[in-house]
Image (tube, rainbow, N blue to C red):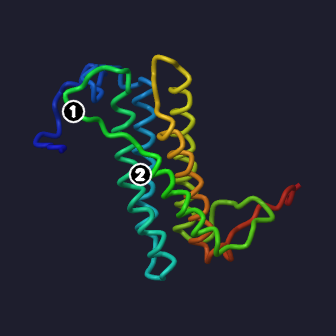
Amino acid sequence: MVKLNKIYTRTGDAGTTGLGTGERVAKHDLRIAAYGTVDETNATIGLVRLHLGELEADRVVDEILGRIQNDLFDLGADLCVPDRGEALPYEPLHITEDQVDRLEREIDLLNAEMQPLKSFVLPGGSPASAYLHLSRTVSRRAERLMTELASDPAEPVSAAALKYINRVSDLLFVAGRYANGRGEGDVLWVPGANR
């Protein structure tokens, strides 16, 4: 269990931070950037939730987003403890395939109520939808950092973690449409409209 009695420790004053393994790395290390961007995703989802209303559709999206916010902390914990085969004095937390499967079911649930797209969607419509698209783009950045990290054999990232962040951005896209009146309020891209 996490226990935070003191917020500042001064251990990072020289530009390093600790991984869950105890290893010290630079604060600009790619692993830190990856889970820092997962944290940014979580913060933007918090903004989304402030803009959801009392409609049943909003409550459905809010419940899903609440679960995702908790899972994103799990993902950060997963990334903070790279599995390099070393024995640790505790059982590290990892993203599971069940968490990925749940996201897929939730994507299918939301998507089933909408018409198929005939164009790309521009971020906008309702405030909640616009923030969902912002969250989607931040989660895609987290995914790019995670895949870059995973491309280094010395920097393991679990397959489930990579799948999870990919599904999160998919879900945020679908939820953005769902928050726009189940896609009725989507702002569609018109190719070449301003030539």
Q: Categorize mark 1 by other alpha carbons within 10 Å: few (<14), some (14-19), many (20+).
A: few
Examine the image and state in which quarter residue 105 appears: bottom right
Residue 146's mark? none
Q: Amino acid at mark 1?
A: Tyr
Q: In front: 79, or 100?
A: 100
Quarter containing the N terminus: top left
Circle 2 Cα neighbour tier, 10 Å, few/some/many (<14 / 14–19 / ≥20): many
Q: Residue at x 56, y 65 (%)?
A: 175
Q: Residue at x 51, y 54 (%)?
A: 101
Q: Which residue is mark 1?
A: 90
Which-is-in-front pick, marks 2 and 1? 1
User: Please, which residue is most extreme toward the bottom here?
Assistant: 55
Near-viewer residue (122 or 4): 4
Q: How far apart are the two marked residues, 2 and 1, measured between alpha carbons? A: 25 Å
Q: Residue 195 is drawn in which quadrant? A: bottom right
Amino acid beneath label 2: Asn
Query: Does 90 appear above or below 104?
Result: above
Is residue 45 left or right of 10 when viewed as pictured? right
Q: State the SS at label 2.
A: helix
* Residue reaching furthest to the top: 154
The residue under label 2 is: 42
| Coordinates of residue 37 in the picture (x, y in percent) | 45, 40
